[in-house]
Amino acid sequence: MQAPVHHVIGLTSIIRERLLPVPGTVNARVQQKVGANDIVAEARWSHEHVLLDVARLLNVSPAAADRLIKCQVDDQVAASAEIAVGKGLFPRTVHTPRDGRVVAVGGGQVLLEVGESKIELRAGIPGTVIQTIPNQGVIIQTTGGLVQGVWGNGRIDSGLMVNLAETPDSVLTVGRLDVSLRGSILLAGIVKDAETLQAAGDLPVRGLIISSIFPSLIPKAREMRYPIMVTDGFGALPMNSAAHKLLATNAKREVTVNAEAFDRYTGARPEVIIPLPISSEPAAPHEMENFAPGLQVRLRRPPAMGTIGSIVNVLPGLTTLPSGLRAPAAEVKLENGETVVAPLVNLEVVG
Amino acid sequence: MPTSLVSGNSLLAIDVGASNTRAVMFDVIEGEYRFVASGVAPSTAEAPFKDVSEGARDAIANLQRILGKTLLDANRDLIIPSQANGSGVDALVVTLSAGPAIKTVVLGLLKDVSLDSARRLTESTYARISDTISLNDARKSDQQIDSLLRIRPDLLIIAGGTDGGASRSIQKLLEPVGLASYLMPKDKRPTVLYAGNEKMQAEVKSLVSAHIPALHFSPNIRPSLETEDTDPAERELAQIIINLRKKQLKGVDTLNTWSGGHMLPTAYATGRMVRFLSKVYGSQKGLLSVDLGASAVTIAAGFKDRSILKVLPQFGIGENLSALLNHTTLEDILRWSPLDISTGVLRDYLFHKSLYPSAIAATKEDFAIAQAVAREALYLAMQTARRDFPQNIRKIKPTLVPLFDPILAGGSALSDASRPGQGLLLLLDSIQPVGVTTVILDQNNLLPLLGAAASQNNILPVQVLDTGAFLSAGTVVSPVVSAKYGASILRAKLVYENGVEAQVDLKYGSLETLPLAIGETGKLTVQCLHGADIGFGPGRGGILPVSGGALGVVFDGRGRPLDLPSDPVRRREILKKWNWTLGGG
């Protein structure tokens, strides 16, 4: 049976797609070296539209209104600009309510795009642009350490990583946060209260890497302007030893936290990328493995949820579990020396 | 030796679920179609595979190992039709429930009329309603356009207008649709199903077809104010869903080609089978099918002249699980747990399980939580579906579920119940059936596959149903009565085929069973006390034939609606006792 892989790798080749949410202009070129905060593409986007029913406002038929409309598609119009004038001794006029761009004209109506804003797409990771996708974005390659998480609040930033999690089960509290951490990315443990998230935002920090978060804090975490990546799950779970060790040994390095929301269909996951210098190109990570003795795995459900172990034996046929269910299973030796039997569907390979 | 009525073609059926993909072989054995074997593999709609055909190939590979027969060629393509050397199959059908819920915006003229019908139509498939637009909508057209652009729906379902009725209002309804689609990138424009005033179809086409790449029409779902007919639109919608999945999920096209276009959404195939069964075995009672799956709870109910199909992704016990708390409370879920579990542990479970929907319960505590969650999800799904059941159907009390016989149940939560008693108790707790009903467990999730197979071979489903591919859990007698805890509410005598008798004195608040093995029949004489009603009227008993099952004849005297003790310690004790009574352990 094939096993999903959860990446916690010290050095690998990382290729990531960075795309605009709407069509725009790509600024970067192939082979260009980019920093995490470099703008690689930009677009203009309007959240709002205004539909002006000229025919109704001038009290004429749609066809007659079309003849009276003075603007065309793609015209930029200022607020209060006259876009149609009626006929007669005292003709009525139709004005634009706001600055905007005409996106459709017809049927006696004018549709304006208003409230335009600019979207700037940052590279997110330092690396080399290996492909540009016209009007959409770029594909960037870099090398370094990679730690995937299970939940992210949708934000991205880069900065110096400071380790506040001396042990995998550390709890981050307001008391641990002081002004010296401003602008840093914090490697922390469990977050149990909203005040801590708020205090980190008030400093502000550039990111937070935590092992677990209470589900009740998710709305607050989504509000925060800095990226928050959860490595292991919900509640009070300690950080898995593989992620903690790798992140802790890379403290004081520049890292990128891309707290992208987990999407099971696209494969997008929140992740920490630790750019590292290389002498030769490392291999790209495997996305699937076959369950086999010796593989390092993480347990997704109890027993020993969140802990790392190695497969001792993939059991033949179906195994009756303590729950009474029968499923393909493996014996897993945990780091504390204990051996547990876990169904294969509850395991993911770490590497 | 029986004479074969069939041509002897083998049929492979593949069900691509959110968590698992099953390949099921049906073939002619001794002149009749039988369920032969099934192979299961994890589904591969998600990353890193992102190709549903991979999971199907794995499931077929597992099946061919069980059968000792070659089904895949060297390139892992299905061998179809079967070859002279015995390899391959003659036909393939596919059902599909994997994939994210289809983002849908529903448009109708009037909120309580066409919009309501369009909502019911939408709930017959794997769709999530992201917005509704009607003439009652207080928003301006431009705000509706902004909403459509923000949501970027996959599908728009438009209803409204009796045949030959309103036309200007429909034009007004279409205005934001046309403009929003025009503003969307071409590859992001939604598919549209128009199921309104049929006289307007040509005009609808001229108004929006320029900006809508896939515009579909079905007969009006609300041809008059008093009439609703969603069946033809459901058929069209099933095809639309497959087309959308072809765009969303790699590999759907491959499976569709292998099957020669015999691919259906799983829920639609289930609904088709329930419609068929309720016509074939039609009784005064309804026929109910429940499927408790990872992507959705599907409830299909067939009544004499109407059928209902409800797909409720909000109650699926997979990736949507963290959102279950939008519909219930932690305390309400925990009322079903026989173990003392804190609300914090349960909350963490819901969020974790939504991260890993295919994970299973390995420990007793995890299993207790999973079963409690499944009970609450199915209970809520039944409460939601009931609102759309026809009014003129037989009920013992208006506030209770209608009389159903049989109840068919499948889905991952029931497959996870390791003993039939666990599955049966889950169904009794969450559906709370009344009167006398047979409960059938579809442990191999065959029902939708038979519904899909019917399009290829209409003899197959009938013959497979008669050959024991489903597990009868037993005949359940559930009286509706108001009595004190411990009072006798029903006495019953079961006379077996060999003349042996067994009796039961059912007390209020208890569960009792009388053994009656699968394949056996007996005569059950029931005497109702305290005005208990089992569908014959208050206090009226009777003699009825019963057939056996894994649990025999089960008497559920726990009352309807089921009223669990408020004291948590007592409640957990009683849940354990009921579980033991049905052999759940």
Image (cartoon, rainbow, N blue to C red):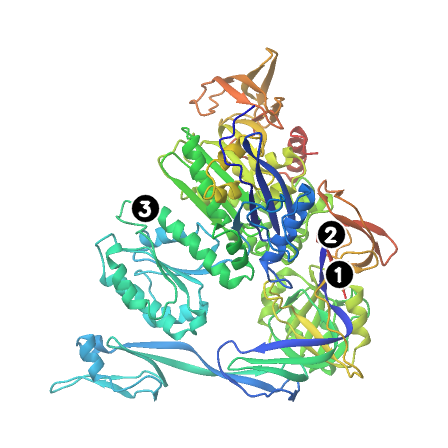
Place of residue A274 in the rendered image (x, y in percent of width and height, measured from the top left): 74, 78
How far apart, in angstroms, are the residues tagged by discs 2 and 1? 10 Å
Q: Residue at x 23, y 63 (%)?
A: B168
Mark 2 residue type:
Leu
The disc at residue A349 is: 1
Residue wearing tag 2: A344
Q: Are marks 1 and 3 in contact (CB under 8 Å)?
A: no
The N terminus of chain A lies in quadrant: bottom right
Mark 1 residue type:
Val
The disc at residue B228 is: 3
The C terminus of chain A lies in quadrant: bottom right
Q: Secondary structure at mark 3?
A: loop
Question: Compared with residue A265, is residue B293 higher up or lower down, i.e. above or below?
Answer: above
How many numbered discs, if any?
3
Q: Chain of mark 2?
A: A
Q: Nearer the viewer, mark 2 or mark 3?
A: 2
Label 2: how many residues lie within 10 Å, few (<14), some (14-19) or many (20+)? many
Give whichever of B183, B572 is nearer the camera.
B183
Give whichever of B470, A178 is nearer the camera.
B470
